[in-house]
Amino acid sequence: MKINFIDLKRQYNKYKTDIDREISEVLESAQFILGNKVSELEKQLAAYVGVRFGIGVSSGTDAILLALMAYGVKSGDEVICPPFTFIATAEVIALLGARPVFVDIDEKTCNIDPSLIEERITERTRGIIPVGLYGQVADMDAIYSIAQRRGLFVIDDGCQSFGATYKGRRSCGLPDVGVTSFFPSKPLGGYGDGGMVFTDNEEIAKVIYSLHVHGEEKRYQHKYIGINGRLDAMQAAILLAKFKYLEDEIKLRQQKGAYYTDGLKDVVVTPYIEPHNTSVYAQYSIMAEKRDELSKYLNDNGVPTAIHYPVPLHLQEAFRYLDYREGDFPVSEKTSKGILSLPMSPFITQDEQDYVIGKIREFCEGLSS
Ligand SMILES: *Cc1c(COP(=O)(O)O)cnc(C)c1O
């Protein structure tokens, strides 16, 4: 059997009529930048996550960058985030000349451990960026209460957790600001780059809106130094078509996730989802002994895998100047050595899952005999 890691073709074939219609509407309108499709998507997604403002932007990375810019983050500031995430989370902090200050993750959820945050706060700390890794939101109440007490902002990196819930509230709809990505493989993916910033804070929303169109207040009147950070109409149209199916897809992801867990929980460490959370399984990631050998065994048998992430950020060459060293974040380091993501999409079939489960069990039984 040959399995796809994420099956975007099956998804397109299923929604083809809707998607093609949306695309041709954009072509017919010749409105390619901003316009109705973008503002309609902003309205629908903001309502979905439960806040007043959504601003469509060029990528998840730019969404975090714009949020940091709106809070005026600058050289000499510090911003806290986990070292076990995609580099974008910390990269944009550094890009503004501020220092990413890493805080280790919780072993079970792989999200930032709130109990370790306070000891890293200094007089230079401006905010915290928790990440909803693999599709499960971090412990936002605990994080937000620290932030409130210490006068810090919170930006929820919901690039993997869009659609997930935390105590009944949606990812990206929690204070102060939530961001997501529409990279094709994300839970709500477009057919190119895109992202969105969400907030209930009108002041911040206004600044972000301006920053994403070169700091404009009115046409050719620039209040801030901004960027070209717009979402294009074609992506917005595709996302409008796909958004209608998001809730159904999330249910399917959760069923597929539960099916993997049932079949694997006695041989590997399966994802732990907090009782107050739901996950959208952006990734279905297990912790396994002899991970690299298991990965090779699966790949040799037609099962693609991925490692999210093989090198924690504090050990990346790009961040060498921060002067962290091996051993600084033991949970992140340990997780990076054992984590393995399996093929996952709303359209993976039961036969395919049975095959993946069978191959993992075969490998593990070989280990123990
Ligand atoms: C994908 C991702 C990003 C970046 O999103 P892009 O749209 O690719 O720029 C940021 N943070 C996390 C956790 C992500 O998974």
Image (tube, rainbow, N blue to C red):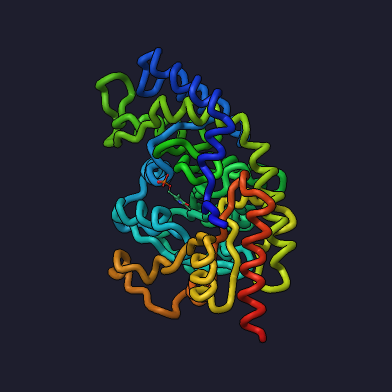
Residue drawn at x 67%, y 63% is: 272
Q: Quadrant of residue 264?
A: bottom right
Q: Quadrant of residue 124?
A: bottom left
Q: Quadrant of the N terminus?
A: bottom right
Residue drawn at x 62%, y 49% is: 348
Q: Position of residue 225 (x, y in %)?
A: 27, 36
Q: Residue furthest top?
A: 29
Compared across the picture, whether 341 is left or right of 354 comes to left
Q: Position of residue 364 (x, y in %)?
A: 64, 76
Q: Residue furthest bottom?
A: 369
Compared across the picture, whether 317 is left or right of 248 comes to left
- Residue 314 visible to the viewer: yes
Residue drawn at x 71%, y 44% is: 168
- Residue 52 visible to the viewer: no
Q: Nearer the viewer, residue 175 or 272?
A: 272
Q: Position of residue 132 (x, y in %)?
A: 56, 53
Q: Residue furthest left?
A: 220
Q: Is residue 238 above or below residue 27?
A: below
Q: Quadrant of the C terminus?
A: bottom right
Q: Is residue 129 above or below residue 293?
A: above
Compared across the picture, whether 137 is left or right of 72 comes to right
